[in-house]
Amino acid sequence: MLVISDTSPIRALAWVRLLHVLESLYGKVVIPPAVVRELQCPDASFDPVDISQFPFIEVLAPADRLAVDRLRRHLVPARQKPWH
């Protein structure tokens, strides 16, 4: 099963040291580069998350930029961030 994640679930599971559970449940998790940046350089209230420790997490940029732009127009501005 392919799972695409944003920042919040990964950050939450890393905080409670249960990020490895995603591999048990799904095998592979895909995140866009913007999520990697948010995890590595978080706001001051969060610790960085080093996803390189979790080989089941794959970083993959969206291939269809036009589809991303169309989707972005329909999203609430706060939820647009991971697609940048």
Image (spheres, helix red, strand yellow):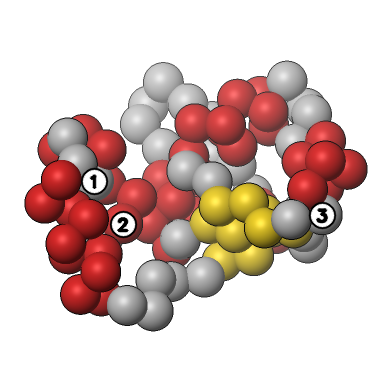
Of the 4 image quadrants, the one containing the N terminus is bottom right
Dot 2 alpha-carbon crowd within 10 angstroms: few under 14, some 14 to 19, many 20 or more = some
Residue 18 lies, with reference to residue 62, above or below; the image says above
* SS for callout 2: helix
Residue 8 lies, with reference to residue 56, above or below; the image says above
* SS for callout 1: loop
Name the residue tied to disc 1: 80
Residue 29 found in image quarter: bottom right
Residue type, mark 1 in image: Gln
Q: CA distance from mark 3 to mark 1?
A: 26 Å
Name the residue tied to disc 3: 27
* Rendered image: mark on residue 13: none
Q: Say whether residue 11 is visible.
A: yes
Q: Position of 1 compared to 15: left or right?
A: right
* Rendered image: mark on residue 83: 2
Of the 4 image quadrants, the one containing the C terminus is bottom left
CB-based contact (under 8 Å), mark 1 and mark 2: yes
CB-based contact (under 8 Å), mark 3 and mark 1: no
Residue 53 lies, with reference to residue 41, above or below; the image says below
Q: Position of 82 compared to 48: left or right?
A: left
Residue 17 found in image quarter: top right
For the residue pair 71 and 59, the one nearer the viewer reads as: 71
**Residue at screen point 44% across, 63% down:** 33
**Residue at screen point 17% across, 64% down:** 69
- Percent across and percent down for residue 78 are 21, 34
Q: CA distance from mark 3 to mark 2?
A: 23 Å
Residue 37 found in image quarter: bottom left
